[in-house]
Image (cartoon, helix red, strand yellow):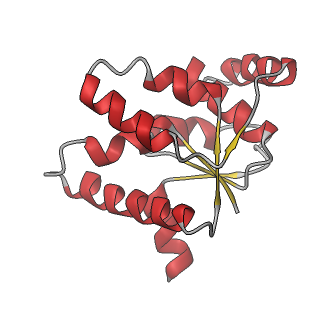
Amino acid sequence: MRIYFDVCCLNRPFDDQSQQRIRLESEAITFLFQQIQQQLWCWLGSPAILAEIKQTPDIARRQAMLLLAGQINEQIPLSDTVLARTAQLRQSGFTPFDAAHLAFAEAGRCDLFLTTDDRLLRVSQRLTEPLPFRIENPLRWLQEIWI
């Protein structure tokens, strides 16, 4: 399985864990990263992930996420196709980074795009032409496959 993690997933383990949703999503993401380290799944990455991480104002958090991103299994290169697709996805209501992440995931033949961003999930559900991969919250997806 080829998985692309939105940067909000990389952020989640460093968020305030006092809220149950955040704590459970963090645990799910940590479990998924363990599966990737065991080479059960392939983690797809892109220049958009590194660009977004580099905008993180908290230096310690930024460094931790960069270390985590260093474990990406396969980098999807920037191309004219990705740029054109990003522009199309922007017209569908996605933010610039969300559109870029989705375009890279599509170019990398992603099977599953994971995000904790509720807005991204809502916008993706309104697409007239669905993307060729699933977009899910990591906790909900794990609950679905393990039940």
Q: Position of residue 83 (x, y in %)?
A: 77, 18
Q: Position of residue 89 (x, y in %)?
A: 71, 25
Q: Residue at x 25, y 57 (%)?
A: 23
Residue 147 or residue 59, whichever sits in front:
59
Apparent side of residue 94 relative to residue 64 in the rendered image (left or right): right
Q: Is residue 30 visible?
A: yes
Q: Quadrant of residue 8?
A: top left
Apparent side of residue 14 relative to residue 113 in the rendered image (left or right): left
Residue 13 or residue 131, whichever sits in front:
13
Q: Is residue 59 above or below residue 33?
A: above
Q: Is residue 24 above or below residue 44?
A: below
Going by the picture, which residue comes out furthest to the bottom? 147
Number of numbered callouts drawn: 0
Q: Residue at x 27, y 51 (%)?
A: 22
Residue 67 or residue 25, whichever sits in front:
67
Residue 29 or residue 24, whichever sits in front:
29
Q: Position of residue 28 (x, y in %)?
A: 40, 63
Q: Residue at x 53, y 36 (%)?
A: 120
Q: Quadrant of residue 45?
A: top right
Apparent side of residue 118 relative to residue 44 in the rendered image (left or right): left
Q: Residue at x 48, y 54 (%)?
A: 137
Q: Is residue 95 visible?
A: no
Q: Quadrant of the N terminus?
A: bottom right
Q: Position of residue 136 (x, y in %)?
A: 55, 53
Going by the picture, which residue comes out furthest to the right? 81
